[in-house]
């Protein structure tokens, strides 16, 4: 259980926070506390605007990898921020049964025990897969917990749940009745290891070494010849399919072969007679311009065969061994058959030559084996009408917005060139197709429920492609097809889908067209596309390369927050990210910086200090500056989160926390905290508490564990950051004047420190500092804040005036509104100082040119916001003044 504020928030002494950030100590038990408090459930506030996200369901094939960690971290950041902003949020978790992928894993495990699925039978095998599912679902739950994902587990779904299965049947039957699902014999991609059909996008093409086998196909009539020979030459990469040849085709416009059309050939090794036909499919420029036609083993040949009413001869079994149609080669594996056939072709005088090549060959995404094009009776979805509706919807207000927008082009291109989708799989794990065949008449019955006389019917043994059920995920998980389901009415359509660009075809496209078909709405408003996680060398992580990283190992070493920080800041939307332990070290260091800064603040707060700002009349320049900078940070981070620019949001937070808050304000606050003015101390405590509180709230969606731990250690009455209010912009706190004045002061302190470092004059040694101001405002700023100059610059003597004369031998720095002289005669080389000032002048000149070019660009001046153009003009003026001052100083030094 989470402790109430009076429990943890009394930890204001050093002993309550370790001197070093320890992620294990911070994270242990925290997630369980959140769950116990039921903080991840929707608020139930019907007045609040709903915001929903469905998790892309991970496959129950194994443990989550870094890509999953990235994907879910981004979702968690979105939903945590929206929850804090007062939305009625739902982040719905779940997992995918992943038909072929899971079945392949289970079969591999059984194979190690010397068992096949056929030994067990369908029912026992499916029981075994359910056990596997439970085993890996438990592991995934543990991983989600370690990552800190704020999921509503009460609504968790699985793609084989009863409710989702009902949705699948409803969709199948509806599409069938509409004529959009049909059954037919076609050439499909066949995985001979899994013994199942595959869709085009489940096939990965790899370059492999192969060969063109040039073979003689003799004429049947001894009187027929071509170029003086009694045969034609055919080149094939797959001689093992020759037994299925039914014709040789040429292009009808190819003048070389017009006289051959209609002549008969003798099929080598088999003796069957096959014709020469003419078809536009043949490319006259490719090879010899003659191709063998094997309708049962090639999709293009299948089309040719249909046009010419050719026989379809399937020569392979499901496991890619040769069948009875292969004659003497029956029983041989396809590749063994190839070797024997090539040997026989050579021995019988048919083989002309072998030409080695490298060509692209399809492989099964899941089992890795070479895919066969195989004639098979399968179930298909007619895609053209569904794709057309999806494309048309993109022209409406209910469109899906892709982030980055360029990925809409990927979606559009696939939809415009889509093929019918083969949805049947010859597997046992999955949604069994709701079709039955009458045992006597062969009649087909398709329905959501089995026929009333099941003894006379046999259900189709095939299951549906995994993506068929996944395509329904955004609405089936909400209770559809019950359109009165509370969650469906409240949270659908969902707001944002987060996923990788590699499954736009597989999943995103299918969710869009199925949602439009069955709900009439888009499934989500935005789809945020991220890239892939690669190793330091930019390579894709894979088992074969041995470069995979287990996110749980990273968490064990660095903590979940460090991993989440790295993942959130890795890249811009749509871009890949490279993982490195150096980046993880930097992430941990940043959190350690936050930890130590927070520890300092908390140690210096009174028990009654609250995160409320004191009266504005009590604020000093540093106070006005840090609160204005915080306000700007809130504005920028909120804007960037809304645009899914998490990397930029992270950089904005990093700069504010590390530079503004830690390096400057906290250091400046020590003067007030250690002084004797109690009112001043109390004021500073409240501002420190406020800024830390707001900063932790901003950070919480990204690094929830450490921010929660620190926040509950502060003296306040909050219950949990999970449901605390997200920071909002207060326009009255924005103070550009204070920001500019503070930057002026910081610039002064920096140049003095840098100058000291150049001549090795340590801060411990007091030196004389002369400041020649060029404006009354600058003079006033420096005089009003002389205590900061004393603290950070350590002057023995400080002069601030408009009529300061530069000592002959002094280090000079030109800053906004002033020139700074450090008379360190014993440490200065005149020639070196002139060179240094010349570099400074050149730097200012470069900035002047850059600003001039921008302002000379009419496109920039016309299109950029007025504020940005004004800032550029101010920069130009500032650098012109600095350049002139630097050049004048060089003249003075050279004049002696």
Image (spheres, grey):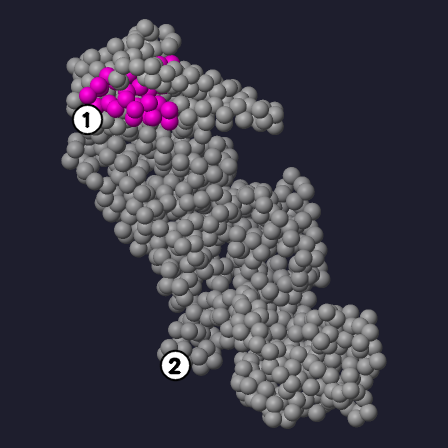
At which x and y percent is residue 523? Answer: 58, 47
Indicate which disc, 1 or 2, sits on the residue closer to the N terminus.
Answer: 2
Give me the disc on residue 114: 2
What numbered label is drawn on residue 195?
A: none
Q: Residue at x 35, y 41 (%)?
A: 703
Callout in the foreground (1, 2): 1
The residue depicted at 22 percent of the width and 30 percent of the height is 600
Q: Is residue 823 above or below residue 250?
A: above
**In the image, is residue 145 above or below residue 785?**
below
Q: Residues within 10 Å of mark 2 (few under 14, many from 20)?
A: few
| Image quadrant where one finds the N terminus | top left
Q: Is residue 225 left or right of residue 699?
A: right
Query: How many marks do you count on the picture?
Result: 2
Whether residue 421 sits left or right of residue 154 in the image: it is right
Query: Could you give the CA–CA distance between mark 1 and mark 2, rounded to whole angstroms?
Result: 75 Å
Mark 2 lies on a secondary structure that is: loop
Q: Residue at x 27, y 13 (%)?
A: 807
Whether residue 640 is visible to the viewer of this picture, yes or no, is yes
Which residue matches tag 1? Answer: 762
């Amino acid at each position: 259980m989470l402790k109430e504020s009076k429990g943890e928030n009394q930890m204001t002494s050093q002993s309550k926070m370790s001197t070093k950030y320890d992620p294990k100590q911070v994270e242990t038990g925290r997630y369980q506390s959140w769950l116990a408090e039921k903080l991840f459930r929707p608020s139930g506030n019907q007045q609040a605007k709903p915001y929903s996200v469905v998790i892309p369901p991970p496959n129950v094939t194994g443990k989550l990898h870094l890509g999953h960690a990235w994907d879910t971290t981004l979702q968690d950041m979105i939903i945590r921020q929206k929850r804090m902003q007062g939305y009625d949020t739902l982040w719905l978790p779940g997992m995918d049964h992943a038909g072929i992928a899971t079945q392949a894993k289970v079969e591999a495990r059984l194979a190690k025990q010397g068992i096949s699925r056929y030994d067990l039978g369908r029912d026992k095998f499916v029981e075994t897969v359910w056990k596997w599912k439970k085993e890996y679902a438990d592991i995934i739950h543990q991983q989600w917990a370690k990552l800190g994902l704020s999921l509503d587990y009460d609504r968790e779904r699985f793609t084989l749940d009863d409710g989702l299965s009902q949705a699948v049947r409803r969709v199948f039957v509806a599409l069938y009745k509409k004529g959009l699902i049909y059954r037919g014999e076609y050439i499909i991609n066949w995985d001979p290891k899994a013994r199942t059909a595959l869709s085009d996008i489940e096939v990965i093409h790899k370059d492999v070494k192969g060969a063109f086998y040039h073979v003689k196909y003799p004429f049947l009539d001894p009187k027929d010849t071509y170029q003086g020979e009694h045969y034609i030459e055919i080149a094939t990469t797959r001689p093992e399919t020759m037994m299925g040849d039914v014709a040789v085709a040429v292009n009808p416009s190819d003048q070389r072969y017009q006289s051959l059309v209609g002549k008969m050939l003798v099929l080598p090794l088999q003796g069957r007679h096959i014709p020469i036909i003419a078809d536009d499919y043949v490319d006259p420029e490719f090879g010899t311009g003659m191709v063998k036609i094997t309708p049962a083993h090639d999709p293009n040949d299948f089309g040719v065969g249909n046009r010419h009413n050719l026989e379809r001869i399937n020569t392979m079994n499901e496991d890619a061994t040769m069948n009875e149609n292969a004659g003497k080669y029956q029983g041989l594996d396809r590749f063994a058959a190839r070797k024997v056939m090539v040997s026989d072709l050579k021995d019988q005088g048919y083989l002309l030559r072998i030409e080695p090549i490298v060509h692209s060959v399809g492989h099964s995404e899941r089992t890795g084996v070479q895919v066969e094009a195989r004639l098979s009776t399968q179930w298909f979805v007619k895609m053209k009408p569904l794709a057309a509706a999806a494309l048309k919807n993109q022209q409406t207000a209910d469109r899906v917005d892709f982030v980055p927008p360029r990925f809409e082009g990927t979606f559009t291109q696939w939809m415009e060139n889509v093929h019918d989708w083969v949805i049947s799989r010859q597997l046992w794990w999955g949604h069994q197709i709701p079709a039955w065949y009458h045992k006597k008449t062969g009649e087909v019955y398709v329905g959501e429920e089995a026929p009333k006389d099941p003894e006379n019917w046999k259900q189709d043994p095939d299951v549906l492609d995994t993506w068929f059920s996944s395509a329904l995920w955004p609405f089936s998980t909400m209770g559809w097809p019950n359109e009165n389901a509370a969650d469906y009415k409240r949270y659908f359509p969902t707001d944002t889908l987060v996923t990788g660009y590699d499954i736009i075809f597989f999943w995103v496209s299918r969710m869009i067209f199925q949602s439009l078909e069955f709900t009439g709405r888009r499934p989500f408003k935005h789809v945020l596309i991220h890239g892939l996680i690669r190793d330091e060398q930019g390579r894709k992580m894979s088992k074969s390369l041995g470069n995979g990283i287990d996110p749980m190992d990273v968490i064990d070493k660095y903590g979940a927050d460090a991993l989440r920080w790295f993942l959130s800041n890795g890249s811009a939307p749509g871009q890949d990210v490279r993982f490195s332990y150096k980046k993880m070290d930097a992430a941990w260091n940043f959190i350690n910086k936050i930890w130590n800064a927070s520890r300092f603040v908390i140690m210096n707060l009174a028990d009654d200090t609250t995160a409320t700002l004191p009266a504005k009349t009590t604020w000093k320049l540093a106070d006005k500056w840090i609160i204005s900078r915080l306000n700007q940070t809130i504005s920028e981070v909120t804007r960037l989160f809304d645009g899914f620019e998490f990397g930029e949001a992270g950089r904005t937070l990093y700069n504010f926390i590390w530079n503004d808050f830690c390096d400057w304000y906290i250091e400046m606050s020590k003067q007030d905290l250690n002084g004797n003015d109690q009112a001043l101390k109390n004021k500073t405590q409240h501002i420190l508490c406020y800024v830390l509180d707001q900063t932790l709230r901003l950070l919480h969606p990204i690094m929830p564990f450490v921010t929660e731990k620190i926040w509950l250690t502060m003296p306040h009455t909050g219950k949990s950051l999970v449901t605390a209010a997200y920071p909002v912009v207060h326009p009255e706190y924005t103070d550009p004047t204070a920001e500019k004045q503070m930057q002026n002061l910081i610039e002064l302190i920096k140049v003095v420190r840098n100058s000291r470092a150049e001549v090795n004059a340590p801060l411990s040694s007091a030196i004389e500092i002369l400041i020649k101001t060029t404006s009354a405002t600058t003079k006033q700023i420096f005089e009003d804040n002389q205590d900061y100059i004393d603290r950070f610059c350590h002057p023995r003597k400080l002069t601030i005036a408009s009529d300061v004369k530069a000592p002959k031998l002094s280090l000079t720095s030109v800053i906004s509104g002033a020139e700074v002289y450090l008379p360190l005669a014993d440490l200065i080389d005149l020639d070196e100082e002139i060179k240094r000032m010349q570099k400074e002048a050149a730097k200012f000149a470069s900035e002047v040119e850059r600003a001039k070019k921008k302002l000379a660009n009419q496109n920039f001046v016309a299109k950029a916001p007025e504020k940005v153009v004004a800032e550029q003009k101010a920069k130009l003026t500032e650098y012109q003044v600095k350049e002139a001052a630097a050049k004048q100083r060089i003249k003075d030094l050279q004049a002696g």
